[in-house]
Image (tube, rainbow, N blue to C red):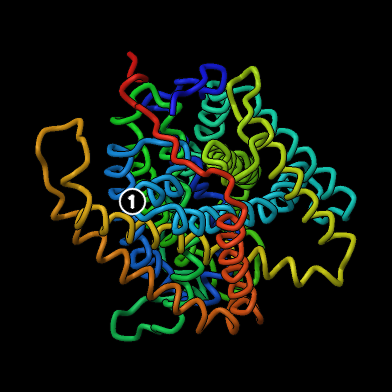
Amino acid sequence: MPADARQTLHKTFQFVDLSSLSISSVAPIFSVAAAGSAMVQAAGAEVPLAIVLIAIPFILCSWIFLSLNQHFPNAGASYHWSRQIMGIDYSNFQAWIVIMAYFWSIPPILIPAAQFTLGALGVPHPGTGLQIVGATFWALFAAGVLLFGAHITARVTQIFLYIEIVSVAFMAIVGYSHWGPPAVGAGSFSLSHIHWAGVIVCMVVAATIVDGWEIDSYASEESRKPRITPGWGGIIGAVSVVLYYLLIWPLLLHQVPLERLQNTSDTLSLWAATVSPQFLPWMRVAIVASTAGSLWLTTFILSRALFAMSRDKVMPGWLGRLNRGHVPHWSIILPILLAMAVVLMQVFFPNMRNLFNLALSAAGFFLVAEFLLDGINMMRFLLIQHHSVRHHYKTHHHAGLLLGSLVVIISLSAVEVLFFIYGPKYIAAGIDQTVGVFLLLGIFYVLWLRWRKAGQGIYVFDGLESQED
């Protein structure tokens, strides 16, 4: 299927851009600040163990993404790979999973972005009106960063990432220079007394803070070397963020009492206020930068997926239209508008708040499901199709990837099952039914696409045409 030059994404990103996107998209500072309390409530001092256990399949997934990028670079990434490997119906279901995973990840970022910003400006307990104003500001800012084109997106992301990296460095320097006896009430880790139920629950929660690195796969068509650089940025992002968590969590657990960590809405600000109050203003700025970056980069992933789905006639054609910056503007604007609508409905219709909270909590399940399906895609590809695909490299084999795919399938399947077992008790009552309804809607979506018979296709991106220096 030939590409219309007017409807082609700009080949902008170099390796450093993709690496920046992958690291920033994980938003490690925002993730710890916002999800830290829930993780400590579940696992106590065993949070680092839970992070390591859940990080293993995710790091293996980053290698899977690298290989699939080399064989099938495409803006649709996971959605497109399943289309190439498993077929249209399976791919349409994965399209639903991808949409659920990333759309329901956007509204939970908007209000914290507003709250963290207002807190940094000296408004510790903002009213509803101010929170809406703050959320609207960041929604518009994120839209602007994305609509002005990939080059602007990369540069703004790098500025915000620089703030985050400097903050992590300062936190490590300040924290370890103040290392001493544990705080009164701090947790202690012992291999002989591991509370496995809590660790398992924490793994389910932590699954939502070790993803985001996959953004460079969705940016593959905008890479100058689409069969070479996409995927490597994801590996760097996945590994670096785990190292960051293992650097920072010992400080939190050693220097702040567990009870205080369990009952705060912002673990990093609490740590800064406890250990080094003069560092608190800078930490708040870093949290804002991390949160904001997470907002537009999550939207970036969803917009590229919708763009690819539009080309294949899985989504309406207007979602694939590009503006002067060669970005799919409606695929950017629509998710942000809908996310703001969800936020407003949560605020103004309290009786619907619990329903939306359940939907937002389900995002973690679908994020894990995306990587689980990619593990299945990889295994089928290696076992059945790999020998028949035209390669751009010399003859090669992937025995390690086959084993890695098996580990991913087994481990992430276990996480999804445990989500249904522990989710209603530890995450939110009714979360299992909510996920079940969304999965059922996904099946109806696939059946509707079959009934519609809209001439769905598979857009094959020829990455060789785009390799530039």
Give the position of the N terminus as an image quadrant: top left
Q: Residue at x 88, y 65 (%)?
A: 349
**Quick one: label 1, few (<14), some, or many (20+) residues within 10 Å?**
many
Closest to the observer: 33 or 260? Answer: 33
Specify the quadrant that holds the C terminus.
top left
Q: Is residue 271 above or below residue 27?
A: below
Relative to 58, is 222 above or below? Answer: above
- Left-right relation of 257 to 381: right
Residue at (38%, 76%) from the top-left corner?
414
* Foreground residue among 396 and 456: 456
- Name the residue type under label 1: Ile
**Residue 385 position within the rendered picture, expressed as x and y whole percent measured from the top left:** 22, 50
Answer yes or no: is residue 278 visible.
Answer: no
The answer to whether residue 429 of the structure is visible from this angle is: yes
- Element type at marker 1? helix
- Residue 380 in picture, x, y percent from top left: 27, 58
Query: Mark 1 sits on what residue?
Result: 85
Residue 135 rendering spot, x and y as whole percentages = 77, 45
Which residue is outermost to the top? 469
Residue 441 percent across, percent down from the top left? 62, 67
Q: Report the number of numbered marks.
A: 1
